[in-house]
């Protein structure tokens, strides 16, 4: 069991370093980005040692990266939106879930970086609707923040922000084709994302795309023609996200941010639920695709009930 845990941690750590090293190979023509990539690679090596030290000293398994939902609002209404269907994103301010303040987020990431975590995906809702939070967390210079965005809000103001903070990396969501993107995200969205990519390319800024992979589009979006097209847009990294079916009634499975706000990262990683998930070796469960925890929701619900009582 010990061997499985350690192998998984090493594998995850190695994956992040490999992804970043490969992605930043594409910036050798840009001295600013190259300098930044070099500093981050040195830091990644140190951080792995720091995570091991926390594990040995405090018995806490520190993950190499986090996924943080920083926004509960969005300017689009995409079909099958995960954030809207589970109540994370809402147009009505009164009905939105409470979010943490920019200062709280900055504190969380400062603590995370101190524990050896230097990578957090920022999601939402639409994270670019919360420039106040992005500005605060950008100051945590030992972390890289891929911002998972619909790409429609990138204009001169965000370009200036991204030029100033190379640790903030936009990852623009598209569905593969113009028709597919507009069909899911709304008329004109694909064109708007292309304009954003053009702006980023003109400024020689590092950015990527994220593509939801389905049984219908996987051949097209993984073809070399498609990857070449993304490269021609200036895109340096691609994230493939498995489609996850969503259903009302499973909101309680989420680890809500109020807990992190109250406890901090160190204590949250030792929550009864996280400890039970690790003890059950849930990350190694057999699954047929999509989200492992969703597929095994009955076991997870059993774990959650005593934690809530
Ligand atoms: S951009 Fe993202 S958060 Fe906004 S509606 Fe679309 S899928 Fe949902």
Image (spheres, rainbow, N blue to C red):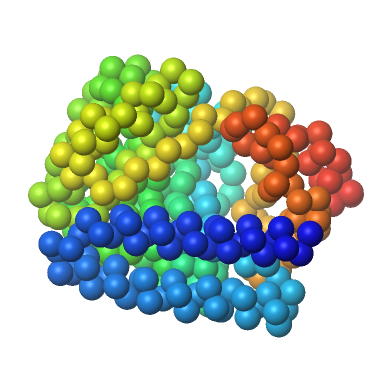
Is residue 85 depicted above or below 96 in this figure? above
The one of 51 and 141 positioned closer to us in this rendering: 51
* Residue 275 shown left or right of residue 89 in the figure: right
The residue that appears at 84% across and 52% down in the rendered structure is 307
Quadrant including the N terminus: bottom right
Is residue 289 depicted above or below 135 in this figure? above
Q: Quadrant of residue 186?
A: top left
The residue that appears at 81% across and 50% down in the rendered structure is 280
The residue that appears at 56% across and 30% down in the rendered structure is 244
The residue that appears at 36% across and 65% down in the rendered structure is 138
Residue 240 seen from this side = yes
Is residue 177 depicted above or below 56 in this figure? above
Task: Please provide percent x and percent y for residue 206.
Answer: 24, 55
* Residue 270 shown left or right of residue 117 in the figure: right
Task: Please provide percent x and percent y for residue 113.
Answer: 50, 72
Task: Please provide percent x and percent y for residue 57.
Answer: 71, 82
Residue 135 seen from this side = no
Task: Please provide percent x and percent y for residue 251.
Answer: 68, 36
The one of 126 and 240 positioned closer to us in this rendering: 240
Q: Quadrant of residue 189?
A: top left
Q: How many marks?
A: 0
* Residue 180 shown left or right of residue 265 in the figure: left
């Amino acid at each position: 069991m010990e061997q499985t845990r350690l192998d998984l941690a090493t594998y995850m750590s190695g994956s992040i370093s490999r992804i970043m090293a490969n992605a930043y190979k594409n910036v050798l023509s840009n001295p600013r980005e190259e300098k930044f990539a070099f500093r981050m690679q040195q830091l990644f090596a140190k951080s792995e040692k720091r995570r091991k030290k926390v594990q040995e000293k405090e018995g806490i398994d520190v993950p190499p990266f986090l996924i943080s939902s920083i926004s509960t609002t969005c300017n689009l209404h995409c079909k099958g939106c995960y954030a809207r269907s589970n109540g994370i994103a809402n147009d009505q301010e009164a009905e939105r879930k409470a979010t943490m303040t920019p200062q709280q987020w900055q504190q969380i990431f400062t603590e995370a970086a101190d524990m050896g975590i230097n990578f957090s995906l920022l999601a939402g809702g639409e994270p670019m609707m919360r420039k106040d939070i992005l500005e605060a967390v950008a100051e945590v210079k030992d972390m890289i923040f891929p911002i998972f965005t619909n790409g429609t809000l990138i204009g001169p103001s965000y370009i200036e922000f991204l030029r100033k903070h190379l640790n903030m990396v936009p990852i623009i969501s598209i569905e593969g084709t113009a028709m597919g993107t507009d069909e899911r995200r709304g008329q004109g969205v694909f064109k708007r994302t292309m304009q954003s990519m053009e702006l980023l390319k003109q400024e020689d800024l590092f950015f990527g795309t994220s593509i939801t992979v389905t049984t219908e589009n996987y051949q097209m979006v993984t073809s070399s023609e498609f990857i070449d097209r993304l490269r021609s847009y200036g895109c340096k990294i691609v994230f493939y996200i498995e489609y996850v079916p969503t259903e009302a009634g499973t909101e309680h499975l989420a680890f809500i941010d109020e807990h992190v706000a109250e406890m901090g990262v160190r204590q949250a990683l030792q929550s009864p639920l996280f400890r039970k998930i690790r003890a059950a070796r849930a990350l190694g469960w057999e699954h047929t695709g999509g989200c492992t925890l969703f597929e095994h929701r009955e076991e997870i619900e059993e774990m959650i009930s005593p934690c809530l009582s």
